Image (cartoon, grey):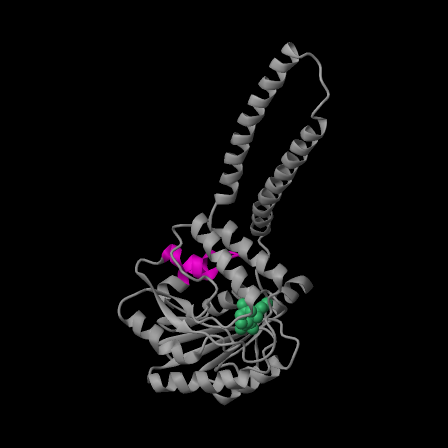
């Protein structure tokens, strides 16, 4: 590794973004060059299957001391791609952003200014969001739900990844070793002086979103289960309420049994109540399962991502990390 000491580190996760990389490169470097501070750009290739890998190699060759590329061995998800970058940052101020140009690189100076004003985390919310109707709807309802469930998590908009963190916060996040996490929420856990600024938002420049409905839901479960016990507590409360109601109902039926005698009317009403309760039990089981699944993932201690190689100055051929170490262990 060279002894280049950047002030800014930009961390970008990339999955199948061949159409966007060239424009990202030119807009990002233009903005950063104007700032006149030493910087590095760390791009993680999260198992792309298009030409992204080859293009990143070429970008690294253009500015070998500024552009570092982490090549994953497969697709481990956006947050793991950012974590891999976090483990290797050298700058004092760390900025995360998406590669699809929905977060305009031109907004970076705004974040840097807020950091230099003394904040340790700069969150963002998107001004005039450019997304499809259903994405807006899902995201708005989710933001509302999150505010309600996690009032301590102070952010208007958790979906915008253009954010800035001070280095000590990034080091703390990297040290958690969490496999299912949500970086902006994690950062707020450690922040002492966070702030929030509005940033412009553009339509995806090219390519398609990597998130479908199912992935979005999974992603939101990660946020909720990772940072709150609210769903479990709600079930305890619902359980208590239903037990009390059922007890009242049993007493009522018993009294009727003595006054009116045996009766069969209302059997279907009872079925309806039963089905409803079974539904609640299954839902509760699912919620418990979401937590247990994550506990299981953490206790197995599998590597949360595997790096095939890293392109950075000082390594004229790809530094073969982890993956090959594992192979050697297997052989030896
Ligand atoms: N991304 C990634 N791994 C994935 C999915 C996405 O590294 O498995 C990257 C993607 O290349 C982009 C960012 O994460 O830079 C956000 O993804 P996308 O634009 O698809 O999400 P959306 O903006 O639709 O939420
Ligand atoms: Mg996007």
User: Which image quadrant for residue 164?
Assistant: bottom left
* Residue 190 visible in rendering: yes
**Relative to residue 101, is residue 9 drawn left or right?**
left
Foreground pick, 123 / 239 = 239
Q: Position of residue 173 (x, y in %)?
A: 43, 60
Question: Residue lying farthest left?
Answer: 117
- Where residue 29 appears, as percent x and y from the top left, is 43, 85
Count of numbered labels shown in the rendering: 0
In magenta, the rendered stretch is 171-190
Magenta stretch: residue 175 in it? yes
Whether 12 is among the magenta residues is no
Q: Position of residue 8 (x, y in %)?
A: 37, 76
* Vertical arrangement, residue 19 with respect to residue 274, above or below: below
Most common secondary structure along the magenta stretch: helix
| Rendered residue at 56%/30% (across/down) | 242
Give how far across and how far down residue 16 sits, in percent. 61, 76
Quadrant showing the N terminus: bottom left
Residue placed furthest toward the top: 258
User: Which quadrant would the C terminus be assigned to in this image?
Assistant: bottom right
Residue placed most toward the observer, 213 or 152: 213
Q: Is residue 250 above or below residue 307?
A: above
Residue 3 appears in view: no
Q: Nearer the viewer, residue 124 or 288?
A: 124
């Amino acid at each position: 590794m060279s002894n280049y000491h950047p002030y800014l580190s930009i961390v970008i996760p990339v999955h199948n973004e061949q159409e966007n990389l060239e424009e990202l490169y030119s807009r990002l470097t233009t903005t950063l060059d104007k700032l006149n501070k030493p910087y590095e750009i760390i791009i993680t290739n999260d198992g792309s299957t298009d030409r992204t890998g080859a293009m990143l190699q070429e970008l690294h060759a253009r500015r070998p001391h500024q552009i570092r590329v982490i090549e994953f061995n497969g697709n481990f998800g956006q947050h793991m791609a950012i974590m891999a970058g976090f483990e290797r940052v050298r700058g004092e101020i760390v900025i995360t952003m998406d590669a699809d140009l929905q977060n305009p690189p031109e907004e970076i100076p705004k974040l840097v200014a807020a950091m230099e004003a003394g904040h340790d985390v700069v969150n963002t919310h998107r001004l005039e969001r450019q997304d499809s109707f259903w994405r807006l709807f899902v995201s708005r309802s989710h933001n509302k739900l999150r505010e309600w469930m996690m009032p301590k998590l102070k952010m208007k908009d958790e979906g915008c990844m253009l954010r800035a963190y001070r280095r000590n916060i990034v080091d703390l996040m990297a040290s958690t070793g969490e496999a299912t996490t949500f970086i902006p929420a994690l950062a707020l856990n450690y922040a002492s002086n966070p702030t929030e600024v509005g940033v412009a938002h553009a339509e995806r420049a090219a390519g398609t979103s990597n998130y479908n409905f199912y992935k979005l839901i999974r992603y939101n479960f990660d946020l909720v289960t990772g940072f709150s016990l609210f769903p479990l507590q709600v079930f305890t409360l619902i359980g208590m309420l239903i037990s009390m109601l059922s007890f009242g109902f049993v007493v009522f039926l018993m009294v009727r049994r003595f006054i009116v005698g045996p009766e069969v009317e209302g059997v279907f009403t009872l079925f309806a109540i039963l089905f409803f309760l079974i539904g609640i039990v299954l839902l509760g089981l699912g919620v418990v399962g979401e937590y247990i699944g994550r506990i299981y993932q953490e206790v197995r201690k599998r590597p949360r991502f595997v790096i095939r190689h890293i392109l950075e100055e000082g390594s004229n051929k790809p530094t073969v990390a982890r993956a090959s170490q594992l192979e050697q262990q297997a052989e030896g």
